[in-house]
Amino acid sequence: MGRNTTTARVVLVTCGSLAEGRKIARAVVTKGLAACVNVTSAPVESIYRWKGKLESSKEILLIIKTTLLRVKQLEKEIARMHSYEVPEFLVLCVDGGSRSYLDWLAKAAG
């Protein structure tokens, strides 16, 4: 695909409970580390390998909209607040989108 043309980033984080997901979402938006967080209210089923064993669990997915400038601080805050030993933290580049939404995101997450 083409070269990334925005500083917008989407970060995926899974949590063990809806309460934890909401707590993290409110904190990162309040602190200006994200412009918006979508909290899935229905759990996703995650199948993964952990410490040599195949595991399966129900998790809440957070879809966090932020900017390149905030990613490192956001990662530190997620690690600080999260209950998992190794929380998921995947950063996806945004190649484009509506200009008005991208402008708002840049202002809201700096």
Image (cartoon, helix red, strand yellow):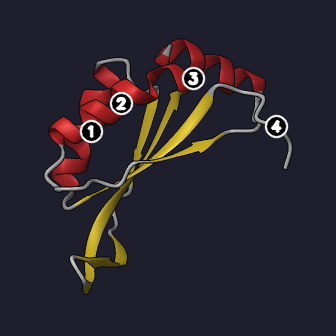
For marks 1 and 4 on the same chain, the one whose residue lies earlier in the sequence: 4
> Which amino acid is tagged 3?
Leu
The amino acid type found where label 2 is placed reads: Leu
Residue at the far bottom in the pictured view: 54
Query: What residue does disc 3 label?
Result: 105
Identified by mark 1, the residue type is Ile
At mark 3, the secondary structure is helix
Is there any visible trace of residue 26 in the rendered image?
Answer: no
Asked if the residue under mark 2 is in contact with the one under mark 4, i.e. CB atoms within 8 Å, the reply is no
Query: Which residue is rendered at x = 18% and y = 46% of the image?
Result: 82
Q: Earlier in the sequence, mark 4 or mark 2?
A: 4
Instruction: Identify which residue is drawn at 19% across, 59% down.
Output: 17
Quadrant of the image occupied by residue 99: top right
For image coordinates 40% across by 28% down, the residue present is: 72
Residue identified by numbered label 1: 78
The residue wearing badge 2 is 74
Element carrying mark 2: helix
Q: Is residue 26 above or below residue 99?
A: below
Nearer to us of marks 4 and 2 is 4
Closer to us: mark 1 or mark 4?
A: 4
